[in-house]
């Protein structure tokens, strides 16, 4: 039996971050991944979707270059080449992670791990013993039980990422982050897009006002939204299309993309043998050092149920390794930013008006059009957006939400302010470079 100080199951953001950190610290580390190193995020999630979206954004910019007094003729795109570039980017980054782990002395094994007990893992015919076990199994696509689903050739996000022929029409079931990003991509390339969302607004969990503004923007671009609508049946049509029935009518589409959410992977690797304490929803209970109810078993990423985001998983992994090393650290979920990489982007961190009200938190809301940023006006001709801040009764920043490019980049400024508990006065004393879009925060609290 081969022995290691740390055995990590899952090679996604949590797993490879933990492996690198533990390896750098001199620990003997084994990382087991059943599919591709990098997990869902790198291979079929965060990175490939953003690569596709950047191609679409570039195409949009070229088509509208005349707004900036630039003439661009014969604007076109090559979808197979867009997909090929996406695959190239993924391969490059996977090789980069592998190289870093090799440099840190991490042993990597590809295969399905099976937990025997808190210190023993089987992979294939091999048994491995570890002082510590770290579970980073990630999540999988949730496929709802819609009648007729098994009869139609539907897409998940994985299929959409490999699309090499543009469908004339696409219906997306689910108006969350993944659904809206694919709506953005295919709408930019000319596909007729319909989004079906069973709640009364897209992007649940994001600031409701900004989500509605984003929806209105995409509606102007031709995206059709069916809110408060549930798909009740699916069937093939004689001409090879897909017919969907909802609780309010029927429709037909060339392609159907299911994007109703993801769920943690909790089966198939012996998790039940550990007897870990769980929440009512099945997530693993952990303390602020990411320890489970079995002290030598750490859990990071989607299994914890806190936040199914890669950047959260990375920080959780760092905290877990620090705990193993005896370094003081703890996980904070006070300021976890969320981003939707549509065009325009939408990003938020901390409390929304809705969450603050639900929690009984008294707050003051201030907001400004993005046009108060000179840099934004210079780079976004004929486009507007909004910046919204929430301040508590001590004038501390507790929430920030932005609609407008590049929201994904500037939201870190607000994330830092919230995590550090800065007041508006303290934040305003920070010198922001000019001209930058990030100055909108300073304008907002000025």
Image: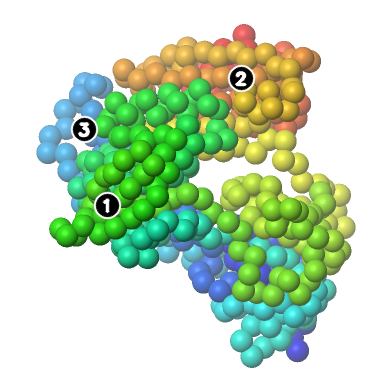
Q: Nearer the viewer, mark 3 or mark 2?
A: 2
- The image quadrant where one finds the N terminus is bottom right
Q: Position of residue 348 (x, y in %)?
A: 57, 31
105 vs 198: above or below: below
Position of residue 215 in the picture relative to residue 296 (left or right):
left
On the rendered image, what quadrant is the C terminus found in? top right
Q: Where residue 142 sits: x, y (%)?
A: 51, 57
Answer whether residue 148 is visible to the viewer in this image: yes
Where disc 3 sits, the SS reads: helix
Residue located beneath label 2 in the image = 389
Whichever of labels 1 and 3 marks the residue nearer the N terminus, that label is 3
Q: Which mark is residue 63?
A: 3
Mark 1 or mark 2, earlier in chain:
1
Label placed on residue 243? 1
Q: How dense is the environment of label 3, judged by Cα within 10 Å: few (below 14), some, or many (20 and up)?
A: some
Residue at the location (56% across, 19% down)?
388
Q: Residues within 10 Å of mark 2 (few under 14, many from 20)?
A: many
As drawn, the residue found furthest toward the left would be 74
Contact flag, marks 1 and 2 (Cβ < 8 Å): no
Task: Give residue 141's position: percent from left, percent from top.
Answer: 50, 58
The quadrant in which residue 187 appears is: top left
Q: Compute the Cα span from label 1 to label 3.
A: 33 Å
Relative to 409, say whether 242 is above or below.
below
- Which dot, 1 or 3, sits closer to the camera? 1
Evaluate if marks 1 and 3 touch, with contact meaning CB atoms under 8 Å apart. no
Residue 150 on image: x %, y %: 37, 65
The answer to whether one can see residue 322 in this image is no
């Amino acid at each position: 039996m081969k022995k290691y100080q740390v055995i990590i199951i899952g090679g996604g953001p949590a797993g490879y971050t933990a492996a690198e950190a533990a390896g750098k610290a001199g620990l003997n580390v084994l990382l087991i991944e059943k599919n591709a190193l990098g997990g869902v995020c790198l291979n079929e999630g965060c990175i490939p979707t953003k690569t596709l979206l950047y191609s679409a954004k570039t195409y949009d910019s070229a088509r509208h270059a005349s707004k900036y007094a630039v003439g661009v003729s014969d604007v076109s795109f090559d979808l197979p080449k867009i997909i090929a570039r996406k695959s190239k980017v993924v391969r490059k980054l996977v090789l980069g992670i592998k190289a870093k782990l090799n440099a840190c002395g991490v042993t990597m094994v590809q295969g399905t791990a099976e937990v025997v007990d808190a210190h023993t893992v089987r992979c294939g015919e091999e048994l491995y013993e570890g002082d510590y076990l770290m579970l980073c199994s990630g999540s999988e696509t949730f496929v709802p039980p819609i009648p007729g689903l098994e009869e139609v050739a539907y897409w998940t996000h994985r299929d959409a990422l490999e699309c090499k022929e543009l469908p004339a029409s696409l219906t997306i079931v689910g108006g969350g982050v993944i659904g809206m990003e694919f709506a953005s991509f295919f709408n930019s390339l000319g596909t007729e897009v319909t989004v079906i969302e069973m709640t009364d607004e897209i992007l649940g969990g994001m600031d409701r006002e900004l989500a509605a503004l984003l929806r209105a923007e995409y509606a102007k671009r031709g995206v059709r939204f069916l809110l408060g609508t549930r798909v009740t049946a699916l069937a093939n049509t004689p001409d090879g299309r897909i017919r969907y029935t909802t609780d309010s009518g029927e429709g037909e589409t060339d392609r159907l993309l299911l994007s109703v959410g993801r769920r943690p992977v909790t089966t198939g690797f012996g998790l039940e043998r550990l007897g870990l304490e769980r929440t009512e929803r099945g997530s693993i209970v952990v303390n602020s050092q990411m320890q489970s109810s079995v002290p030598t078993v750490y859990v990071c990423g989607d299994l914890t149920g806190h936040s199914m985001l890669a950047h959260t998983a990375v920080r959780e992994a760092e905290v877990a390794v620090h705990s193993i090393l005896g370094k003081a650290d703890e996980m904070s979920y006070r300021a976890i930013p969320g981003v939707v990489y549509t065009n325009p982007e939408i990003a938020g961190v901390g409390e929304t008006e809705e969450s603050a009200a639900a929690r009984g938190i008294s707050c003051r809301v201030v907001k400004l059009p993005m046009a108060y940023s000179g840099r934004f006006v210079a780079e976004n001709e004929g486009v507007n957006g909004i910046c919204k801040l929430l301040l508590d009764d001590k004038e501390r920043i507790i929430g920030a939400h932005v609609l407008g490019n590049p929201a994904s980049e500037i939201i870190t400024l607000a994330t830092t302010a919230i995590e550090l508990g800065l007041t508006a006065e303290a934040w305003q004393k920070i010198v922001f470079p000019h001209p930058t879009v990030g100055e909108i925060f300073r304008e907002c609290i000025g």
